[in-house]
Image (cartoon, rainbow, N blue to C red):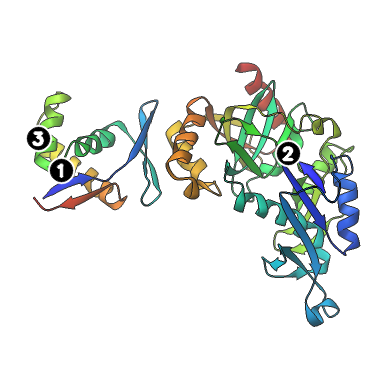
């Protein structure tokens, strides 16, 4: 399954991000990891595995099941918050 | 016709309690001629039909139309103040409006956002008698144009136990008659210290966002909090964030970006005053 970000505005404050979705008025704060996942979606719809590979490369993280599971949880949170949505490949 | 901060109100009512309250609380405010344009026309009228005489009521009429459910006649004066708040929060979208008290010292403003019952107004009423200028006890007006916080400078609303707390804390403070059995309990309004009226049109730059919480027996404690979380909580306390959309989001982030944010818990007003004095001198 692929995930895509909705049209959002955001601002970094210290080491957190505030994200605003104008179409619904959703406003939430994200820590750096969650913000990085959302940022990757803004570049185009991606699968969990693709996001994990990118993060592992950019942040020098081990590409493990734990990382993929964490990204899946974050994606579920982002979808629940209305900031991302599942899309057809 | 009364000017309070950036707004002018044409206030009319047949009730003696409203006239007396206005005389006590707004007697030193700028008054305009009756035929000058007013931003808002607030009329606190008698109840309709039999309610004019039987269990008599008071009603807020805006442009000739009732806005809220009627209240008992005895609640006419608080209804006036609540109606004035509604006028601003429902229409003044040239401001980002936050449900918060605002005080100022040295040209720097502290916004105190909080839901009802948090002790915000008690804290505000205490601080304005200890060296802080009152901008507002209820509505923080952040200009969408320049990002400054503009004063409203209206009487401070106090309720229930906080009334006696402030009477003891500042015996020279003047209060309107207490209205009992409202939906908020017993309420009154405290006159704004007259010296603050001279600065009614002087804005301030936001420097601190302080989320207050009264906790019985607790020592005064100012704890730094997340600025990102503060943006979210300020929006939650805003009357019109949803109306303003993306410009409101950008303005709110700009506001917090230049501020320090805190959670503040307290029980004794003297301790709270000291804590805010330290805040002002540390900046």
Question: In the image, residue B83 lies at what x, y percent?
Answer: 71, 57
Question: In the image, residue A33 lies at what x, y percent?
Answer: 26, 33
Q: Element at badge 3?
A: loop
Is residue B216 among what the camera can see?
A: no
| Mark 3, residue position | A64
- Subunit under mark 2: B
| Mark 2, residue position | B5
| On screen, residue B175 above or below B52 | above
Do the residues at discs 1 and 2 belong to one chain?
no
Q: Element at badge 1?
A: loop
Residue B89 has which mark? none
Question: In the image, residue B274 lies at what x, y percent?
Answer: 70, 25
Q: Residues within 10 Å of mark 1 (few under 14, many from 20)?
A: many
| Mark 1, residue position | A45
Of circles 3 and 2, the one toward us is 2
Question: In the image, residue A45 lies at what x, y percent?
Answer: 15, 43
Quarter holding residue B190:
top right
Q: Element at badge 2?
A: loop
Marks 3 and 2 sit apart, C-alpha to C-alpha, by: 60 Å
Of circles 3 and 1, the one toward us is 1
Q: Is residue A40 left or right of residue B183?
A: left
């Amino acid at each position: 399954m692929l995930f895509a970000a909705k049209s959002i505005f955001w601002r970094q404050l210290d080491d957190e991000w505030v994200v605003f979705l104008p179409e619904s008025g959703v406003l939430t704060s994200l820590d750096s990891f969650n913000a990085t996942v959302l940022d990757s979606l803004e570049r185009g719809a991606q699968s969990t595995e693709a996001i994990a590979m990118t993060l592992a490369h950019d942040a020098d993280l081990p590409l493990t099941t734990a990382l993929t599971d964490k990204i899946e949880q974050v994606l579920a949170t982002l979808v629940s918050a209305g900031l991302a949505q599942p899309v057809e490949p | 016709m009364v000017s309070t901060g950036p707004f002018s109100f044409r206030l009319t009512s047949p009730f003696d309690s409203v006239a007396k309250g206005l005389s006590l609380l707004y007697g030193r405010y700028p008054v305009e001629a009756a035929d000058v344009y007013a931003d808002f026309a607030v009329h606190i009228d008698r109840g309709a039909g039999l309610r004019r005489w039987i269990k008599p009521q008071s009603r807020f009429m805006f442009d000739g139309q009732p806005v809220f459910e009627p209240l008992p006649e005895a609640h006419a004066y608080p209804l006036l103040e609540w109606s004035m708040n509604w006028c601003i929060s429902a229409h003044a979208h040239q401001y980002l409006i936050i449900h918060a008290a605002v005080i100022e010292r040295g040209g720097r403003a502290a916004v105190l956002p909080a839901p009802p019952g948090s002790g915000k107004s008690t804290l505000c009423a205490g601080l304005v008698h200890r060296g802080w200028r009152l901008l507002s006890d209820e509505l923080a007006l952040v200009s969408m144009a320049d990002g400054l916080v503009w004063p409203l400078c209206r009487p401070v609303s106090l309720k229930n136990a906080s009334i006696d707390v402030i009477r003891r804390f500042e015996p020279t403070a003047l209060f309107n008659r207490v209205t009992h059995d409202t939906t908020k309990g017993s309420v009154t309004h405290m006159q704004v210290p007259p010296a603050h009226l001279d600065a009614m049109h002087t804005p301030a730059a936001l420097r601190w966002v302080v989320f207050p919480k009264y906790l019985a027996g607790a020592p005064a404690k100012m704890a730094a909090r997340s600025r990102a979380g503060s943006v979210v909580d300020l929006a939650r306390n805003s009357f019109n964030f949803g109306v303003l959309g993306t410009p409101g989001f950008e303005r709110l982030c700009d506001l917090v970006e230049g501020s320090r944010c805190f959670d503040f818990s307290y029980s004794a007003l003297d301790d709270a005053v000291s804590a805010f004095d330290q805040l002002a001198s540390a900046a």
